[in-house]
Amino acid sequence: MTSGRTRPAVGDRLLLVVNPAAGRGRAMRLLPAVLHRLRAAGRPVSVIEAAASGATADRVRSTVDAGAGAVGGVVALGGDGLAHLLLDAVAGSGIPLGLVPAGGGNDLAAGLGLPLDPRAATDVVVAGRTREVDLGLVVAPDAGRRWWGSILCAGFDSAVNERANALRWPTGPRRYDVAVLIELARLRPHQVRLRLGDRVLETDVILVAVCNTARYGGGLLMCPSARPDDGYFDVTVVTPVRRGELLRMLPQVRTGAHLAHPAVRVHRVTSVGIEPCGASPATAYADGERIGALPVETRCERGALTVFVP
């Protein structure tokens, strides 16, 4: 596991980070009840109200480091965007991360086996049980070093992510369904050079999904076998298919049945590189957040995150 930071003794104080925009205001509506529940259990809580931006991660990281062991956990009250950013604040520190879902998809919480009900998720933090799980560490020219927790993707699925993030309606998982239909009309394969561990493969792909957990896009099971505590990525590669065939495959992603299609292959590795060949641009996303243009490299860092669990 990569640390790069000292591991302070864990104290009692919690940092509760709330994104006011999450869930179209749902996080702020939940804040009083979450605060009451944490404080009723005897946990001192400091609240940081901040948008899902890099400045939030910097602020939380500074608070954690300045606490010199007084911080007993960082709790994200929001969606996948806030959770993703807070990984940069706590990865490798030993400070537990708690996830109280209040966003649209909440895929990271679900992928880690955490409750999606905010009250139950708050009770998980109160109980204080933790375990270590894996994270991906990505290196990209446009992004530097970034931590991620669920799935890093490039190709059709990252284009859907980019489209979905630009849509203002509908909300929740249906936003991804609309984005899929829009991007399906623009479908074209990308020629890439994949480094899968020690193996190098140059091929045309529709998408590449590097999976630390099983799901993304509000519940799509891109790789049901992926586990966040085994030290490996499961990499789903889809080679070119016709639009109509891809359209028939897409509903199967909700159950994982797409893996039986001959155009789909899954590779189990500890590191992945994705490099465009020629003029074949694509953008990488991780946890639903934009990482940057290819090329990217990512590796699985075993036990890099401590998380509150049931």
Image (cartoon, grey):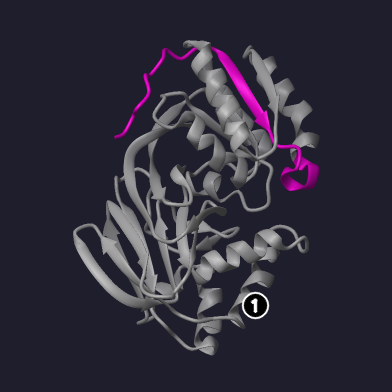
Q: What is the x, y in percent for residue 99?
A: 58, 36
Seen from the viewer's position, the closer of residues 109 and 78 is 78
- The structure residue drawn at horizontal position 46% and vertical position 23%, both measured from the top left corner, is 95
**Position of the N terminus by quadrant:** top left
| Residue located farthest toward the left when viewing the structure as drawn | 198
Q: What is the x, y in percent for residue 244?
A: 54, 89
- Does residue 93 appear left or right of residue 179 in this picture? left
Span shown in magenta: 1-26
Tag 1 residue: 181
Seen from the viewer's position, the closer of residues 118 and 169 is 169
Seen from the viewer's position, the closer of residues 145 and 306 is 145
Residue 2 part of the magenta segment: yes
Asked whether the viewer can see residue 275, the reply is yes
Q: Secondary structure at mark 1?
A: helix
- The structure residue drawn at horizontal position 50% and vertical position 68%, both measured from the top left corner, is 255
Type of the residue with mark 1: Leu
Q: What is the x, y in percent for residue 27?
A: 74, 38
